[in-house]
Image: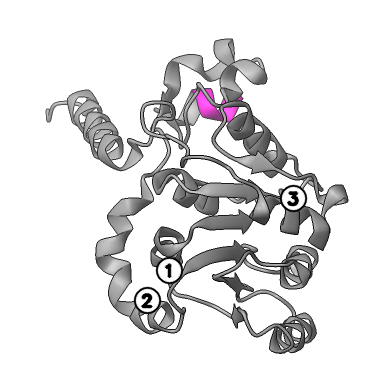
Amino acid sequence: MNAIRQYYDAVWIYGDPAVFDPVREYGLVDAVGTKVRYTGYLDQRARLEFAKAEAGPVLQSVPPGKLALCVVGGGHDGRALAEAFLQADLPTHTTGVLVTGPLMPWEERRRVRRRAERRPRFQVLDFVPDSTPLVQRADRIISMGGYNTVCEALSFEKHALIVPRVDPEPEQWIRAQRMRDLGLVDVLHPRDLNDGALTEWLARDLGPSPHTRGRVDLGGLTRIPTLAADLLRSAVSEEPLPA
């Protein structure tokens, strides 16, 4: 905290205090409260303009009909979720797409590919440059609780089941719980993860898509330039005049 007080002009938190306020949760109001600025979450819809060209072949490989998308972040600890998804029963006229991530170990990736070969309505992608177009195309999303994936689900107002990492850091678990409390996502603790739980969620009537905008601040991409400009103006005004 001393370093922040002494060396930093501002602390930007890429989130919404209505969801989680680390300054108050961790008792940091007196230490850094005056320097904190909340940017809001980052609305991922703006990325579509740049991502659609590269995603074209991937989207074309997905058959018409509904899409259940499973993403496991980088993939280094996503095996359990990937295997449970590939063993789940899909609703009628639904294709399942699993993105393993570039960090899933080679042997685990080979195992999930073999499993998918026995399930003709599933596809496995090792890596996509940008998952945003797939998220937009999806009807339901099953994922771990990483920041980017949660932002994508919120941005496109998708039904999402989050199976967060709980160890060694609780960040994903805390984020998922807060989003669930707002009625924006469903959450499954990893100890309860199995193909039956995913089958049940995929078959459940979840009603209309969650209405995110107006309930969660997604204005980060428009707010950050203003925050940066404020810092620059402050730095210029504090420069000493030449002798």
Label 1 packing within 10 angstroms: few (<14), some (14-19), many (20+): some
Q: Nearer the viewer, residue 227 or 98?
A: 98
In the rendered structure, which disc, 1 or 3, sits on the residue that comes first in sequence? 1
> Looking at the rendering, in which quadrant would you find the N terminus?
top right
The label number, if any, that marks residue 149 in the structure image? none
Q: CA distance from mark 1 to mark 3?
A: 22 Å
The residue that label 1 is drawn on is 130
The residue drawn where x is 74% and y is 87% is 118
Q: Are marks 1 and 2 in contact (CB under 8 Å)?
A: yes
- Note whether 225 is above or below 58 in the view shown: above
Q: Nearer the viewer, residue 132 or 172?
A: 132
The residue drawn where x is 50% and y is 21% is 18
In the rendered structure, which disc, 1 or 2, sits on the residue that comes first in sequence? 2
Q: Position of residue 130 (x, y in %)?
A: 43, 68
Drawn side of residue 19 relative to residue 44, left or right? right
- Note whether 211 is above or below 135 in the view shown: above
Q: Amino acid at mark 1?
A: Asp
Give residue 123's quadrant in the image: bottom right
Q: Main secondary structure of the magenta part?
A: helix
Label 2 packing within 10 angstroms: few (<14), some (14-19), many (20+): some
The residue drawn where x is 34% and y is 79% is 56
The residue that label 3 is drawn on is 165
Viewer-side label of 2, 3: 2
Give the extent of the magenta segment: 1-5
